[in-house]
Image: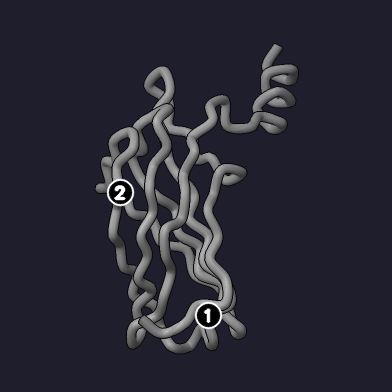
């Protein structure tokens, strides 16, 4: 029965509505500054940040984040200038359900056309 389980898991989506919102995104030197607010449904135990540049993309994991329901997080991500111009920043929440970590990429917030802070 592992085959059936694998098919279900590959089609799985985040089982809860998180309600993550982006308050702001901007650039300061070689750092992306952002402010996000969690919804009122579940706590967030980490963030996966994808930075897409004109030359390449980078992924960062912010594992030490514990964002309570309704909480606000001010963050910053340093990036290497070799990625080129920052085109998009995508922040995906990581939650814990029944002792399993879930990365909810379909509940991500996206920042585009970032301006200087």
Picture quadrant where residue 94 is located: top left
Q: Dot 2 corresponds to which residue? A: 72
Q: Residue at x 45, y 59 (%)?
A: 49
Image height of 40 relative to 48, above or below: above
Q: Earlier in the sequence, mark 2 or mark 1?
A: 2
| Rendered residue at 37%/21% (across/down) | 99
Mark 1 element type: strand
Q: Position of residue 11 (x, y in %)?
A: 72, 31
Kindly state the secondary structure of the residue where label 2 is placed: strand
Q: Is residue 2 left or right of residue 67?
A: right
Could you say which quadrant of the image residue 1 lies in?
Answer: top right
The residues tagged by marks 2 and 1 sit, at their Cα atoms, a distance apart of 24 Å
**Coordinates of residue 18 in the picture (x, y in percent):** 48, 35
Check the picture and name the quadrant holding the C terminus: bottom left
Q: Position of residue 48 (x, y in %)?
A: 44, 53
Q: Which mark is residue 66?
A: none
Residue located at (57% from left, 46% from top)? 105
Choose top left, top right, bottom left or bottom right for residue 44: top left
Which class describes the residues within 10 Å of circle 1: few (<14), some (14-19), or many (20+)? many
Asked which colour scheme the image uses, the reply is: one colour
Q: Give the vertical position of 110 relative to 97 (above or below).
A: below
In this picture, is 48 found above or below 111? above
Q: Residues within 10 Å of mark 2 (few under 14, many from 20)?
A: some
Q: Pinpoint residue 38: horizontal percent, then vertical percent.
A: 39, 42
Q: How many marks?
A: 2
As drawn, which residue projects farthest toward the top? 1
Find disc 1 in the rendering and name its residue. 86
Q: Is residue 8 above or below residue 43?
A: above
Residue drawn at 57 percent across, 71 percent down: 112
Q: Nearer the viewer, residue 61 or 14?
A: 14
């Amino acid at each position: 029965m592992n085959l059936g389980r694998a098919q279900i898991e590959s089609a799985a989506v985040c089982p809860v509505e998180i309600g993550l919102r982006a308050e702001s995104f901007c650039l300061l030197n070689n750092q992306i500054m952002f402010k996000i607010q969690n919804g009122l449904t579940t706590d967030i135990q980490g963030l996966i940040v994808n930075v897409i540049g004109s030359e390449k993309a980078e992924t960062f994991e912010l594992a030490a984040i514990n964002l309570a329901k309704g909480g606000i997080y001010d963050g910053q991500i340093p990036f290497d200038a070799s990625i080129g111009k920052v085109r998009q920043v995508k922040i995906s929440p990581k939650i814990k359900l029944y002792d399993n970590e879930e990365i909810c990429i379909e509940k991500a917030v996206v920042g585009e056309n970032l301006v200087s802070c």
